[in-house]
């Protein structure tokens, strides 16, 4: 039996935007279309929240038969906010589309910061 293909992409950036503003923008799933290359609607949920740190999870389908599990982490660090994205793509079309997704998502955080 063949295993379903899986691919993971991680992106890290920082910003000087206020922590609360970044947190609110990541929890507003209806605004994802302003900065995410695929999603116009998302249902983000908070997994873990501590002082100066939030972990947010979201799952959607960028292509029929493929799921993308998005994990966002934001942390306050030395007067800046560290932005971490980990996307896990799973489905049979993944090997055909991973190059396209890498190009689409390489400037994900830049688009996010501009949309703030």
Image (cartoon, helix red, strand yellow):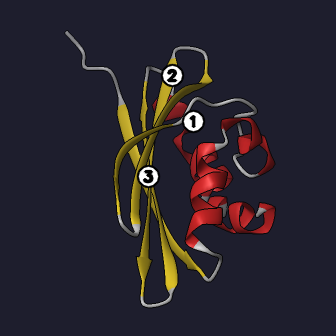
Q: Give the percent coordinates (x, y) of residue 80.
A: 52, 84
Taking depth in this image into account, of 105 and 42 the one nearest to the observer is 42
Q: Which residue is drawn at 51% across and 22% down?
A: 66
Q: Quadrant of residue 2?
A: top left
Look at mark 2 in the image and give the residue it sits on.
Answer: 66
Q: How crowded is mark 1: few (under 14 residues within 10 Å), some or many (20 or more)?
A: few
- Quadrant in the picture for the C terminus: bottom right
Circle 2/circle 1 CB separation < 8 Å: yes
Question: Which residue is most to the top?
Answer: 1
Q: Where is residue 100 in the image (x, y as percent from the top left)?
A: 63, 45
Q: Which badge, 1 or 3, is on the more N-terminal residue? A: 3
* Left-right relation of 65 to 116: left
- The local crowd at label 3, few if under 14, some if 14 to 19, many if 20 or more residues have their Cα within 10 Å, is some
Q: Is residue 19 above or below residue 6?
A: below
Name the residue at the left extreme: 1
CA gap, disc 2 and disc 3? 15 Å
Say which of 46 and 102 sits in front.
Answer: 46
Q: Quadrant of residue 112?
A: bottom right
What residue lies at 25% left-to-right and 20% top-to-bottom? 3
Of residues 18 and 107, the one drawn nearer to the viewer in this rendering? 18
Q: Disc 2 or 1, which lies upstream in sequence?
A: 2
Relative to 33, does residue 54 appear above or below in the rendering?
below
Residue placed under numbered mark 3 in the picture: 9
Sooner in the amino-acid sequence: mark 2 or mark 3: 3
Query: Residue, x 69% and y 68% (percent of image)?
Result: 110
Q: Position of residue 4 (x, y in %)?
A: 32, 20
Query: Left of 20 or right of it: where is 88?
Result: left
In contact (CB < 8 Å): disc 1 and disc 3: no
Crowding near pointer 2: few (<14 within 10 Å), some, many (20+)?
some
Q: Is mark 1 on a helix, strand or loop?
A: helix
Residue beneath disc 1: 97
């Amino acid at each position: 039996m063949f295993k379903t293909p899986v691919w993971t992409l991680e992106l890290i950036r920082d910003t000087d935007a206020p922590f609360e503003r970044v947190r609110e923008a990541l929890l507003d799933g209806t605004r994802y279309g302003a900065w995410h290359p695929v999603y116009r609607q998302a249902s983000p949920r908070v997994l873990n929240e501590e002082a100066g740190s939030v972990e947010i999870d979201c799952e959607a389908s960028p292509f029929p038969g493929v799921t993308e599990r998005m994990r966002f982490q934001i942390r306050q660090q030395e007067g800046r906010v560290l932005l971490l994205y980990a996307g896990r793509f799973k489905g049979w079309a993944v090997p055909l589309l991973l190059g396209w997704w890498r190009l689409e998502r390489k400037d994900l955080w830049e688009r996010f910061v501009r949309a703030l």
